[in-house]
Amino acid sequence: MKISKVLYLSAALAAVLSLYLFARPAKSGVTLLNVSYDASRELYRDVDDNFAAAWKSKTGQTVTIRQSHGGSGTQARAVIDGLEADVVTLALAYDLDEISQRAGLLPQDWQSRLPDHSAPYTSTVVFLVRKGNPKQIRDWDDLIRPGVAVITANPKTSGGARWNYLAAWGYALRTNQGNEAAAKDFVTKLYRNVPVLDSGSRGATNTFVERGIGDVLIAWESEALLALKETGSGKVELVVPSISIEAEPPVSVVDANVNRHGTQTVARAYLEYLYTADGQEIAARHFYRPRLKSVADKYANQFPALNLFRIDEIFGDWQKAQKTHFSDGGIFDQIYQPAS
């Protein structure tokens, strides 16, 4: 009896130890899926490598981050339809609101869980033109001239393209004393000059830079500066418009998925890393404007001074902007006629 009892206790103890050893997160690997927008591949490749090293050093745990990229609206729909993102790092708040409202995968107050409305860095909208600027493009007005081919992505699928559209609308509104009809006419003329709409911002950049289509690319500053760096042969030049918009790409843990995957702690730490000095340095190196003042001051010469407006100053918020401009039957559908 004593031997049986000892064997029973030993087996029970071994089972408990086995569960403990295999349950300890610091000694097991974990995988996250970051579902992001089209033009953030390079940024998050760098973030992922540095965060994984920092997390390993801190906890002993190996973390692997997988990436998924596409147009921001398309990516949001994929998460709603079942793509099991642990975190989303998309181009605009409306896409995260959709994930919350349509699928219930994150709370409605997701923006309050991290600083700066859960947008750890910002960007804006600028232009790329051909070397020497042969069409003499200086500001938004030049984009509606006859014979100027404008490249931008489709705002129905691309978050970056929605920022582009709103930047143009805001410029027209401010230079026409708030006249909505004049703004609509201006943006209508602009999209008449668009020969093709790619589904995402990176596709639009490739159309302009690699395929050589168009006279001017409307792009996020981060994407434009990256293209300038990578071309290296002086194929394109940067043009900064007189007025533009402050773009705030937000991030969030996808609560329902991390709860199911058991990745809550590491997913939160991954997004919090974006706000650290190291994370802000990585953002700046990839041409996103950092929030942290010490890093922003260090990289100040990299970013041109701009007259920027925020979305809430002109459009109310993303819910109102989406309903008015980008929903089915909205203003964009009314003004854009694809080339036949």
Image (cartoon, rainbow, N blue to C red):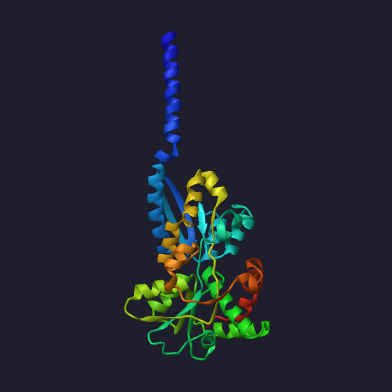
Q: Quadrant of residue 118?
A: bottom right
Closer to the camera in the image, 188 or 43: 43
Where is residue 81? Give x, y as percent: 56, 56
Closer to the camera in the image, 89 or 275: 275
Q: Quadrant of residue 244?
A: bottom right
Where is residue 52? Give x, y as percent: 40, 50
Give the residue at the far bottom of this rendering: 146
Q: Is residue 131 visible?
A: yes
Q: Is residue 158 visible?
A: no
Residue 94 lies left or right of residue 263; in this view the side is right
Count of labels shown? 0
Q: Residue at x 61, y 85 (%)?
A: 175
Q: Is residue 141 above or below residue 167?
A: below
Task: Specify the quadrant that holds the N terminus.
Answer: top left
Closer to the camera in the image, 277 or 133: 277
Closer to the camera in the image, 295 or 258: 295
Q: Is residue 91 above or below residue 86?
A: below
Give the residue at the far left of this rendering: 233
Where is residue 260? Give x, y as percent: 53, 44
Q: Residue at x 51, y 85 (%)?
A: 139
Where is residue 18? Give x, y as percent: 42, 29
Give the residue at the far top of this rendering: 1
Residue 171 lies left or right of residue 123; in this view the side is right
Q: Residue at x 42, y 40 (%)?
A: 26
